[in-house]
Amino acid sequence: MGADGITADWIAADWGTSNLRVWAMAADGRVLAAAGSDEGMGKLSRHGFEPALLRLAGAWLGAGVTPVVACGMVGARQGWVEAAYRAVPCTPVDAAAMTVAPARDPRLSVRIAPGLSQDRPADVMRGEETQIAGVLAQEPGFDGVICLPGTHCKWAHVSAGEVVSFQTFMTGEMFDLLSRQSVLRHGLTGAEGDDPEAFDTAVSDALSRPEKIGARLFALRAEGLLHGLPPVTARARLSGLLIGMELAAARPYWLGQAVALVGSSRLCAAYARALAAQGVTARLMGDTACTLAGLTALYRPKEA
Amino acid sequence: MGADGITADWIAADWGTSNLRVWAMAADGRVLAAAGSDEGMGKLSRHGFEPALLRLAGAWLGAGVTPVVACGMVGARQGWVEAAYRAVPCTPVDAAAMTVAPARDPRLSVRIAPGLSQDRPADVMRGEETQIAGVLAQEPGFDGVICLPGTHCKWAHVSAGEVVSFQTFMTGEMFDLLSRQSVLRHGLTGAEGDDPEAFDTAVSDALSRPEKIGARLFALRAEGLLHGLPPVTARARLSGLLIGMELAAARPYWLGQAVALVGSSRLCAAYARALAAQGVTARLMGDTACTLAGLTALYRPKEA
């Protein structure tokens, strides 16, 4: 039994570039405990992964061997061990295709889920495939499109239990760079609250004239200088412009489709609002619930 | 006479966010000496401007009062003194509208050129108006479009000696952010040389489907991971995608127009190549020559 009174049957781990989240799982699928840290892949050298995991989950280990199932950038070339991509079309995850990560602590048996790759147009994902598996675990008959907003937003066509194709957009990373590091940051500081009308107009503007983005971005700065554009409006317009441009390119994914949104609730709400304006009703699915359902499917495959 | 044997009749200064460049000018318009530093507006507090100027140009001062004419972000709200924008349509510069900057050294008489503003669509420029004046000083009959590539690329309609309208694109800043700070940086490091064909294809792709930019950007990363896309090709494509997207939005500026390009020779060459593929022959005009001609026009107005 661990120091905090919990012994995990197995451990689920979502290990991205910036963060590590772990859950102590019971044999019946319940979550016994959760923990997180900022020891993401980006901060760790190859030999830093095992200690980072033990710092968070070491107290949950019993006397025997505890299985750990991890997804995300932990399986990248710069991660703990490279888990080679599986090429679409294919099921989102395959328990038999996981890669064993070398661990010195004999109590650990760590397996990492591979990401997915697409040959042409070239694309990759790591971590989202597990969330897609989580959607299918919760709704085995799901057929349609799954959109996973985030730093690199993914749109995936899912049919007959397989990921047919997918496409990645750098929308989230562009929002972060522009709002924090570009000249626009001066007009966005102190933005609190929201401006849904400004967001809606910006989405519509970007959808109808997507190529104007470069000019519309600088206009946020100029309107701040000349007309006192409020930071909250500027931020809503920046978000709307970038999401609108993404929707313009992703149109073949959402037009006339059943769309499920998986991601942070705030970001998914923005995408849902933008899609609703195009006549698409998207369903919001819990971020963590999908990750856990996907990791559980990897730990305990249906056919087993 | 200054310590290095040069006494300036007057001093020209191009003072941007990142750099300060000064020239010792003779009465007959010759450049006697030039100097530069990285003490741009972004690094200086209000009281730091005069010492920064004296560090570079102090040795050029004679016994009497030396006029200094400056353009650029030195006249911004966060600059030495705010030089209020002049609203287009108007001449690019007006010697009578310069703002005097307070100086403690009695040998200095510093005047700063105002930037230009446009009410709707909201837009601003600081520094480029002086280069536009420089184009007109060299070619008084110029009628057409002046494109000034850089961090924030400006396109200006110039007719009958006035700036009629202009538009700013964040293309340069987006290139810097994406190539240095985004996930794309991994696939761009060590890029040496050029790949003109990849650039041309990317310009064409962006012009025909500008909304695809968010997806095409991530494809650079994915093709690097999956297909070993060479960094030099990735960099050329990133540049071509961003410039192509700008050209898509700036079409009303260049279509069927005489275009003059003012900026760094490398960047102007890229714009000229992209424009040539659209059937537009652009003329490249020297960056520094235009700045100096514009500052000279401010120091010594034609009518004087």
Image (cartoon, coloured by chain):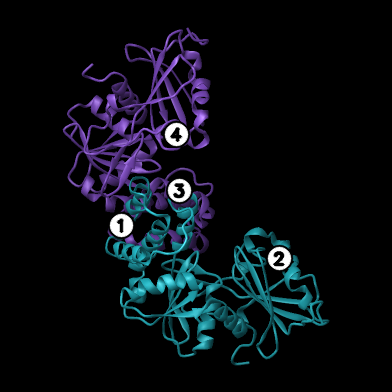
Chain colours: A cyan, B purple
Query: Mark 4: which secondary structure?
Result: loop
Looking at the rendered image, the disc whose residue lies closer to the viewer, 1 or 2, is 1
Q: Which mark is residue A186?
A: 3
Residue that badge 2 annotates = A49
Q: What is the x, y in percent for residue B258? A: 20, 39
Q: Residues within 10 Å of mark 1 (few under 14, many from 20)?
A: many
Q: Residues within 10 Å of mark 3 (few under 14, many from 20)?
A: some
Callout 1 touching callout 3 (CB < 8 Å): no
Callout 4 touching callout 3 (CB < 8 Å): no
Residue that badge 4 annotates = B79
In this picture, residue B267 sits left or right of residue B143: right
Mark positioned earlier in the residue sequence (1 or 2):
2
Callout 4 touching callout 1 (CB < 8 Å): no
Residue that badge 1 annotates = A211
> Marks 2 and 3, how far apart in space?
38 Å
Q: Residue under mark 1: which chain is it in?
A: A
Query: Mark 2: which secondary structure?
Result: helix
Q: Are marks 2 and 3 on the same chain?
A: yes
> Marks 1 and 2, how far apart in space?
43 Å
